């Protein structure tokens, strides 16, 4: 019988984890700088800088390489990808370039998060299959033993 290796965050792709962390930090910094100084919607800054707050919730778990955090943050970052594409296509000048940069950073985070989480998902599926196979084998052996006692 084969056993499924137990994965931990340090034994998997550290490059993906670092890429996710750095792109998340850059996305937070960009969101704040964009809406307060670089190209705010209103002169003097915009309340849109608050869009960085949900990303802050993912920062600690991403730093700690928490698989659950990277899973939900990979879905959250798709909102930033969409915003970056929309603003890149509809805004003009610096704001459009910042929109494309936001889309790029969100895409980098998404790819890195999925790259980091994928081995954990594969290991979980393999463990589930192994458990099901073990249960099926035990059930077959039990029914065989019951048949011999008749």
Image: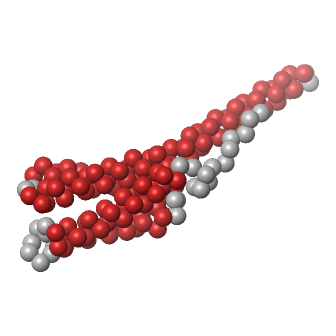
Identify which residue, 14 or 91, lies in the foreground: 14
Image vertical order of residue 137 relative to residue 89, above or below: above
* x 9%, y 72%: residue: 42
* x 68%, y 44%: residue: 5
Identify which residue, 31 or 19, lies in the foreground: 19
Image vertical order of residue 121 relative to residue 103, above or below: above
Quarter occupied by residue 36:
bottom left
Q: Is residue 139 left or right of residue 118?
A: right
Image vertical order of residue 144 relative to residue 112, above or below: above
Identify which residue, 117 or 15, lies in the foreground: 15
State how the image is colored: secondary structure
Q: Is residue 99 left or right of residue 42?
A: right
* x 76%, y 29%: residue: 137
* x 50%, y 44%: residue: 118
Q: Residue furthest front?
A: 15
Q: Residue furthest bottom?
A: 44
Is residue 40 among the parts visible in the rendering?
yes
Q: Is residue 97 left or right of residue 76?
A: left
Q: What x and y, as percent, mark residue 147?
A: 86, 22
Quarter occupied by residue 20:
bottom left
Q: What x and y, as percent, mark residue 149?
A: 92, 24
């Amino acid at each position: 019988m084969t056993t499924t290796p137990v994965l931990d965050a340090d034994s998997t792709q550290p490059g993906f984890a670092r890429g996710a962390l750095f792109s998340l930090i850059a996305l937070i910094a960009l969101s704040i700088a964009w809406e307060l100084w670089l190209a705010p919607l209103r002169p003097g800054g915009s309340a849109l800088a608050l869009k960085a707050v949900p990303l802050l919730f993912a920062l600690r778990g991403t730093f700690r390489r928490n698989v659950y955090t990277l899973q939900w943050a990979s879905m959250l970052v798709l909102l930033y990808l969409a915003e970056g594409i929309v603003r890149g296509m509809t805004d003009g000048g610096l704001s459009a370039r910042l929109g494309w940069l936001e889309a790029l950073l969100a895409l980098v985070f998404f790819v890195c998060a999925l790259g980091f989480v994928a081995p954990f998902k594969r290991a979980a599926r393999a463990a589930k299959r192994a458990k099901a196979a073990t249960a099926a084998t035990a059930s077959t052996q039990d029914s065989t033993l019951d048949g011999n006692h008749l």
